[in-house]
Amino acid sequence: MTRTTLLAVVSTWLLMQPELASACAVCFDANDATRQAYMSATILLTGLPLLVIGAGAYWIYRQVNAPVSAEPGGS
């Protein structure tokens, strides 16, 4: 077995063993309140950028489609 093949096999095996490092704070925490907090934070941090991008797109849409005033004063 070549050195590269051995490195690939060992790396793949280590990547398949997350429980060795307790890599997931949500999966390995016994406290249900902490697990719920992690899940809520994940949902919030996933949705917030989508909300900001959507609000920006809506604002641009409104600016492009705003009625043009006939008078320079805007009234």
Image: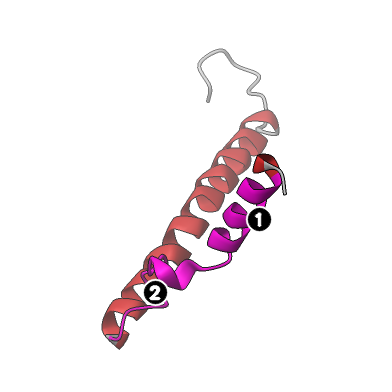
Q: Position of residue 14 (x, y in %)?
A: 53, 60
Q: Is residue 15 left or right of residue 37?
A: right
Nearer-the-camera pick, 60 or 49 = 49
Quarter holding residue 44:
bottom left
Q: Circle 1 sits on which residue? A: 9
Q: Which residues make up the magenta segment?
A: 5-30
Compared to 6, does 17 lie above or below? below
> Foreground mark, 1 or 2?
1
Q: Is residue 19 magenta?
A: yes
Compared to 4, does 19 lie above or below? below
Q: Position of residue 65 (x, y in %)?
A: 70, 34
At label 1, the amino acid type is: Val
Nearer-the-camera pick, 59 or 39 = 39
Q: Are marks 1 and 2 in contact (CB under 8 Å)?
A: no
Q: Looking at the image, is mark 1 or mark 2 earlier in the sequence?
A: 1
Nearer-the-camera pick, 54 or 17 = 17
Q: Circle 2 sits on which residue? A: 26
Quarter holding residue 3:
top right
Estimate the spatial distance between the alpha carbons at disc 1 and disc 2, rounded to whole Å.
28 Å
Compared to 9, does 33 lie above or below? below
Q: Residue at x 65, y 33 (%)?
A: 66
Q: Is residue 53 left or right of residue 70?
A: left
- Judging from the image, what secondary structure is the residue with disc 1 in? helix
